[in-house]
Every structure is written in structure tokens, then in C-alpha cells.
Image (tube, helix red, strand yellow):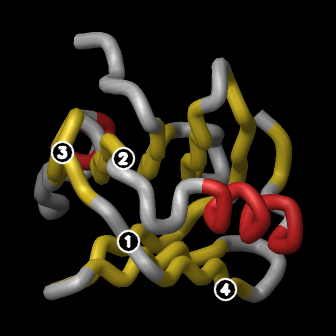
Amino acid sequence: MKPIEIDKVQDKLEHFKNKQIYIHLETTNGAYASHFNQDKYNVGAYIRNAKASYHQAKIVGDGKSFRVGLKMEIGWIYAEGLTDWEMLDSKLLMAGHDREGRLMVSLQISETPFSY
């Protein structure tokens, strides 16, 4: 993966607009959160192959981390803390890593289901 470039990612987000897509969205602070500090809680969320369609997409950020919002007919999907991206087999893959390179958030968009 490479660091997010807003214009390039925005262009890829526009490609998927108004199409039936599959979403992978994952957040985690991983097991490392509670293993090294008993006062921290391990949290996460995971969804894979959720069918969706959005009519508006926007990426914003400060140059270090970014937020992507996908506006659907009756709601939103968003991911915050994204740092890296790539296109892989026509799938848009975005991820956020912490200072040690550990995965914190992932948002992936595809016109075909993700493997599971």
C-alpha cells in the first residue's frame, strides 16, 4: 500500500458511485491494546460483503490521516483514520495504520464479493 493521495482516491471513489457494491469495513485496536496495558479495552467492528450503493463519496483529511464518507439513500458509511490505499484486482483498498504499522481501520470497496 502507499500513502493516500486525495485526488487519486477521490477519483476511484467516483468510479463506484451509483453502482451495486460490496463493502468490507473493519476497525480494531487489536489484542495489543489490552495485552500491554490492562487499563485499555480491546474494541473492534467487522463487516464483510455488505451490499450497498452510494450516490456521493468524499475523502477529507489533514495529510496524515483521512476520513472517507459514502452517502447512501438513507444513511452513511464512513471510516476515519485511513492512511494508505491501493487498487488490487479492481478493488479499492484503504487502511489506517498506527505509528507502529498495526492495522487500525480498513475500508474496501468492490463490485464483486470479497473472498471469505
Q: Residue at x 58, y 40 (%)?
A: 93
Q: Secondary structure at mark 3?
A: strand
**Position of 48 relative to 83 (above/below):** above
Q: CA distance from mark 4 to mark 3?
A: 23 Å
* Badge 4 amino acid: Val
Q: Is residue 101 left or right of residue 104?
A: right
Q: Position of residue 107 (x, y in %)?
A: 44, 51
Q: Nearer the viewer, residue 32 or 90?
A: 90
Q: Which residue is mark 4?
A: 60
Q: CB under 8 Å between callouts 2 and 3?
A: no
- Find residue 114 and report its horizontal and vertical position in percent: 34, 22
Q: Which mark is residue 54?
A: 1
Residue lying at 63% horizontally and 42% vertically, measured from the top left: 100
Residue 85, horizontal then vertical, whole percent: 71, 46
Q: Distance of mark 2 from mark 1, alpha carbons?
A: 9 Å
Q: Amino acid at mark 3?
A: Ala
Lateral position of residue 24 relative to residue 59, left or right? left
C-alpha span from label 4 to label 2:
21 Å
**Residue 31 tag number:** none
- The 10 Å Cα crowd at callout 2, few under 14, some 14 to 19, many 20 or more, is some
The N terminus, quarter of image: top right
Q: Which residue is mark 2?
A: 21
- Decide which of 44, 85 is in the foreground and name it: 85
